[in-house]
Amino acid sequence: MPFHLRKLLPCTIGSPFPKILNTNTHGTSSIISPPLSPTSSTSPAQSKQSTAVQQLYQLQKRHSSTSSSNTASSTASSNSSAPEKPKSSSTTQSKAVGQQQQQQELPKMTERATFAAGCFWGVEKAFQKHFKNDNIKTRVGYIGGIDAHPTYKKVCSGITRHAEAVSIEYTPSPTITYPLLVEFFYRMHDPTTLNSQGPDRGTQYRSAIFAHSSDQADIARRVTKEVQEARYGRKKIVTEIVWREGSSNGAGAGGHAWYDAEEYHQKYLDKNPHGYECPSHFLRW
């Protein structure tokens, strides 16, 4: 035990050594006297006292040794059971890799465009053929009318006021953007004939662009103006650009609900290669 932890106390009668105050590892104190060796001048009472003190000294010495051993063992066990801290560099690297993988897995944004340009069989085929390398998805259907349950027969009668149209889902890229889609729309049909394309007559065959956002409506107006000036001169384009401010960007467009046409109309000319195609559906430039 370090010397500075010891405190000398006054000697007691019959003991030639000073008593030592020992502070153990538990913070308690005990008085330890060195063993006394009996001498010839020692009385029987003193000899008996010396023997008792010697036994007490040995017991306290063993107790102090055991306590120190247990404390050291407990400290070692506590240190070995503590979890090891992860390396900060490894953690940072793993987090960066995880974020990179998450960004790579994010799906690309898909946009939608809706056009009416006469009989929807030929319109769908024209877009599919021209943008075949862009993995577009097309559906034909009815839009812009007043009947909540349109059928092909009703639409052809004109009473529902719907237009035959094509809905296109695409992922924007350098080869397919909304301005390019609008330009192709004008290239593949005649936008100057009111409510008709070729021999097909009726409001269901009208030329129309149903915008899904105000941005699409602005683009459609700009491209229409450019095509009018560059291609048609005094012959006026009668295409409707339909957009209602505040309408949703759901499956419908221009504030109108979209209704899928009957299944036999979907990809009709793929199923019927020799089926009817409007003679007005060809590329003008």
Image: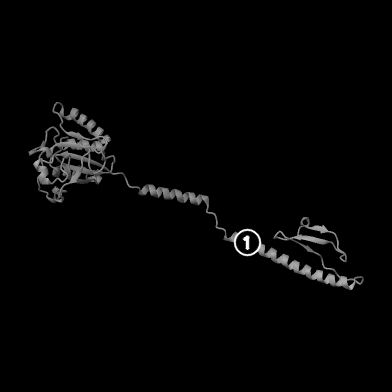
Most extreme residue toward the right is: 41
State the image coordinates of residue 215 (x, y, percent, origin top left): 27, 35
Quarter containing the C terminus: top left
Question: With respect to residue 139, does 30 lie above or below?
Answer: below
Image x and y of residue 254, in percent: 22, 37
Name above or below for residue 245 compared with residue 274.
above
**Residue neighbourhood size for the residue with mark 1, other residues' Cα within 10 Å, grouped as few (<14), some (14–19), many (≥20):** few
Q: Is residue 20 visible?
A: yes
Q: Residue at x 47, y 49 (%)?
A: 93
> Is 26 situated left or right of 33 in this image?
left
Residue 126 seen from this side: no
Instruction: From the viewer's perspective, tell me whether residue 275 is left or right of residue 216.
Output: left
For label 1, the residue is 76
In the depicted view, which residue is nearer to us: 46 or 248? Answer: 46
Task: Please tell me which residue is depicted at 73% across the width and 68% down the height of the picture.
Answer: 62
Q: Position of residue 219 (x, y in %)?
A: 25, 33
Q: State the residue in front, 77 or 128.
A: 77
Picture quadrant of residue 154: top left
Type of colouring = one colour
Q: In which quarter of the view is residue 174 placed? A: top left
Of 111 and 6, which appears nearest the observer?
6
- Classify the position of the N terminus by image quarter: bottom right
98 horizontally vs 24: left or right = left
